[in-house]
Image: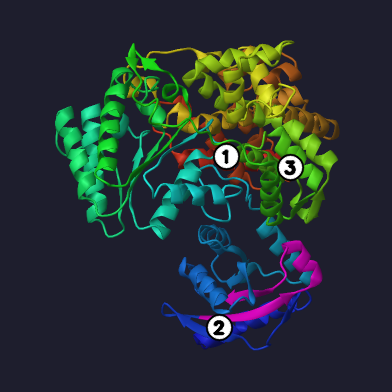
């Protein structure tokens, strides 16, 4: 058979798709258009979805359907779809594209690339092409709705994810052009780094200034002395002045100067700048007397800020504009009058400004907008209930909605989430995940600002009114206490976290420790960076293991009634164990035996009895791989843990949990 030319291959692909699509969309033209991009030939059609599909996908414009015959799809295919959408001058949906392809792995790759480029890609593999309109609609909705748009773990600054604080960031960027010093203080995961990143982007994009960033959580920053850090800042300003994009980061110093020379060098560098300088200091807690990684800054804090203050004041006298934005958790070291009986040099320099939780309206808008792309419609009161339970902390709100997303059947979407459903699922979320999440954040705050612990716990008692007015104001600005009377926790997550702390659930986190060396005190990731993720993963792992034990026991008991010749549940679980484990467990009951099995032994039972459990897990290889990932706990070993490790753990836990939920 003669091999078809590329245009004919594309026409064949279009014809193959036409039947399943004809009842769910109407084509603007029956003949496909062709385009050559990056030496590749593509075909495309504009299609208007039926009212049912448009409602399901939450769209109201035509959709691009792109055809590609490459056997190995590359990211350029998604770029082509973006270019065609942009060239349509608003005719096409700007954040959605359907791509029909011939790559067996394309359904996994294309959506991932699309998300990184801001396009929701709905892939259709020609080798498993839906044959009816109903199958196609289910496939498209599943591809779109199975992605969790709420699951964002790192800082965000793009418009699709940055909610409620855009004007605040714009105002801050403008103020930093006039020589001001600002601060952005708040508990972990409230969005400090997100807003700092947004302000940096605004300064770089819309203001003619030099932007210098110092991330104090980096080992090479907090491990420096005051002299070295002063030198490093001067070198970073020099690099920004020379750079075409007028941007640089503070790194290790090239030279080793004493403090007077380093101070003079920094001032000279500022005076040489022809444009305003904006210095962004993030994670400032690492260079305060309460640093979790080094004791040096107990004395070095005052030395650094005293000399930096002199540089800042002299620069103003020389009519040079230098601005500073400081981000961190604890306001303590910028509020005390003295440190070690020496006047606090940062007291009059760094203002005590907090990044408070989102306004309730912004929280509700964030929930409703993000949820639409997952096929979820929250009513106003259900979104308000989620916001209230999460104290309007954007990261907590996202995690709660992510939980609701995981607990809502994809096949039933689009679906309206009513208030009763929200309350039920929020209660479960707080019990399973939210309590731990909030405990980690609050425990970290109390560790770096211990004066706030007792006032916070007092709200659980009968006399919250005894809190000092100064502490009450700080706790309200942190978002821990309600902003209005009566004096009470700001939400369900905070209340349950405070109860847990009061019951010594997080006693180890609250133990004061004297740091020695970075390798002894901090894991490669560090508690302050990854504690929330690790705590949630560990709790999810424990819950999954309990459900797995119960499921195995129930399924084997039910199967033993039908297949009596194979023995009871206890005998069949024992048969899956090695001899050395089997002997000491022979006398225990089936219920006790299920409780005593280790994770890999639970896996062995399922594998040995696969016909019983195949309806639950479907894919044996995927099940075994997921079990091995869950069993590999990198946070308990002497090895580096990075975002990839945590992502693999989350993916495996989510898959196993979803399979068990379907049992």
Q: Residues within 10 Å of mark 3 (few under 14, many from 20)?
A: few
Q: Nearer the viewer, residue 370 or 475?
A: 475
Q: CA distance from mark 2 to mark 1?
A: 40 Å
Residue 131 figure quarter = bottom right
Query: Which of the two discs, 2 and 3, labels the residue nearer the N terminus?
Result: 2
Q: How far across and how far down the image is residue 172, in percent?
A: 47, 47
Taking the magenta stretch, the answer to whether it contains residue 489 is no
Taking the magenta stretch, the answer to whether it contains residue 65 is yes
Residue found 72% across the figure and 63% down from its top: 57
Q: Nearer the viewer, residue 12 or 362?
A: 362
Q: How far across and how far down the image is residue 519, in percent?
A: 33, 23
Query: Which of the two discs, 2 and 1, labels the residue nearer the N terminus?
Result: 2
567 on left or right of 228: right
Residue 418 figure quarter = top right
Q: Which residues are magenta?
A: 42-68
The residue that label 1 is drawn on is: 650
462 on left or right of 181: right
Q: How far across and how far down the image is residue 185, in percent?
A: 49, 33
Image position of 204 with respect to 17: above or below: above
- In the image, which disc is placed on residue 287? none
Report the quarter where the C terminus lies: top right
Identify the element where label 3 is drawn: loop
The residue that label 2 is drawn on is: 9
Image position of 659 with respect to 66: above or below: above
Do callouts 3 and 1 mark residues in contact (Cβ within 8 Å)? Answer: no
Do callouts 2 and 1 mark residues in contact (Cβ within 8 Å)? Answer: no
66 on left or right of 240: right
Query: Which of the two discs, 3 and 1, labels the residue nearer the N terminus?
Result: 3
The residue that label 3 is drawn on is: 407
Q: How far across and how far down the image is residue 500, in percent?
A: 65, 18
Q: CA distance from mark 2 to mark 3?
A: 42 Å
């Amino acid at each position: 058979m003669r091999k078809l030319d590329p245009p004919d291959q594309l026409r064949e692909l279009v014809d193959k798709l036409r039947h399943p699509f004809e009842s769910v969309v109407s084509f603007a033209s029956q003949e496909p258009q062709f385009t050559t991009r990056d030496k590749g030939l593509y075909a495309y059609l504009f299609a208007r979805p039926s009212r049912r599909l448009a409602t399901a996908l939450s769209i109201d414009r035509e959709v691009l359907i792109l055809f590609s015959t490459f056997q190995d799809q590359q990211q350029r295919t998604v770029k082509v779809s973006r270019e065609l959408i942009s060239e349509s001058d608003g005719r096409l949906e700007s954040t959605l594209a359907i791509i029909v392809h011939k790559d067996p792995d394309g359904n996994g790759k294309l959506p991932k690339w699309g998300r990184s480029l801001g396009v929701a890609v709905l892939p259709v593999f020609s080798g498993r092409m839906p044959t009816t309109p109903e199958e196609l609609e289910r496939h498209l909705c599943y591809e779109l709705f199975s992605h969790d748009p709420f699951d964002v773990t790192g800082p965000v600054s793009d418009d699709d994810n940055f909610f409620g604080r855009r004007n605040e960031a714009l105002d801050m960027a403008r103020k930093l052009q006039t020589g001001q010093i600002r601060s952005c203080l708040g508990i972990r995961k409230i969005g400090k780094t997100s807003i700092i990143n947004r302000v940096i982007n605004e300064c770089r994009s819309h203001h003619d200034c030099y932007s210098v960033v110092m991330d104090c959580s980096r080992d090479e920053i907090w491990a420096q002395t005051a002299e070295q850090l002063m030198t490093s800042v001067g070198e970073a300003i020099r690099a920004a002045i020379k750079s075409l994009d007028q941007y640089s980061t503070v790194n290790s110093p090239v030279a080793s100067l004493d403090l007077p020379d380093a101070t003079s060098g920094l001032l000279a560098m500022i005076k040489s700048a022809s444009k305003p300088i904006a210095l962004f200091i993030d994670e400032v807690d690492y260079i305060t007397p309460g640093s979790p990684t080094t004791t040096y800054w107990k004395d070095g804090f005052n030395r650094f800020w005293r000399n930096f203050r002199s540089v800042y004041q002299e620069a103003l006298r020389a009519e040079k504009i230098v601005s500073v934005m400081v981000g961190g958790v604890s306001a303590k070291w910028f509020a005390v009058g003295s440190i070690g009986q020496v006047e606090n040099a940062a007291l009059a320099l760094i203002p005590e400004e907090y990044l408070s939780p989102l306004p309730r309206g912004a929280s509700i808008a964030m929930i409703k907008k993000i949820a639409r792309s997952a096929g979820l419609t929250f009513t106003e009161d259900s979104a308000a209930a989620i916001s209230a339970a999460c104290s309007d902390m954007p990261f907590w709100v996202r995690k709660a909605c992510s939980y609701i997303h995981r607990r809502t059947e994809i096949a039933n979407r689009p679906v309206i989430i009513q208030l009763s459903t929200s309350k039920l699922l929020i209660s479960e979320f707080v019990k399973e995940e939210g309590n731990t999440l909030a405990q980690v954040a609050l425990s970290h705050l109390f560790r770096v600002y211990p004066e706030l612990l007792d006032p916070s716990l007092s709200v659980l008692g009968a006399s919250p009114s005894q809190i000092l007015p100064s502490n009450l104001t700080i706790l309200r600005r942190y978002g821990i206490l309600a902003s209005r009377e009566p004096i009470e926790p700001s939400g369900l997550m905070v209340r349950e976290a405070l109860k847990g702390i009061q019951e010594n659930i997080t006693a180890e986190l609250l133990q004061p420790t004297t740091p020695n060396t970075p390798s002894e005190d901090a894991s490669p990731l560090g508690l302050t960076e990854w504690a929330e993720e690790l705590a949630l993963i560990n709790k999810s792992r424990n819950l999954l293991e309990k459900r797995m034990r119960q499921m195995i026991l129930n399924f084997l008991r039910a199967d033993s009634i039908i297949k009596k010749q194979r023995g009871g549940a206890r005998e069949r679980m024992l048969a899956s164990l090695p001899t050395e484990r089997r002997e000491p467990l022979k006398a225990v009951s089936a219920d006790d035996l299920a409780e005593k099995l280790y994770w890999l032994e639970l896996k062995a039972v399922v594998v040995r009895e696969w016909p019983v459990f195949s309806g639950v897990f479907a894919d044996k290889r995927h099940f075994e791989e997921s079990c091995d990932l869950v069993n590999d706990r990198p946070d308990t070993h002497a090895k580096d843990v990075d975002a990839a490790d945590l992502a693999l753990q989350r993916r495996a836990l989510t898959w196993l949990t979803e399979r068990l939920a379907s049992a």
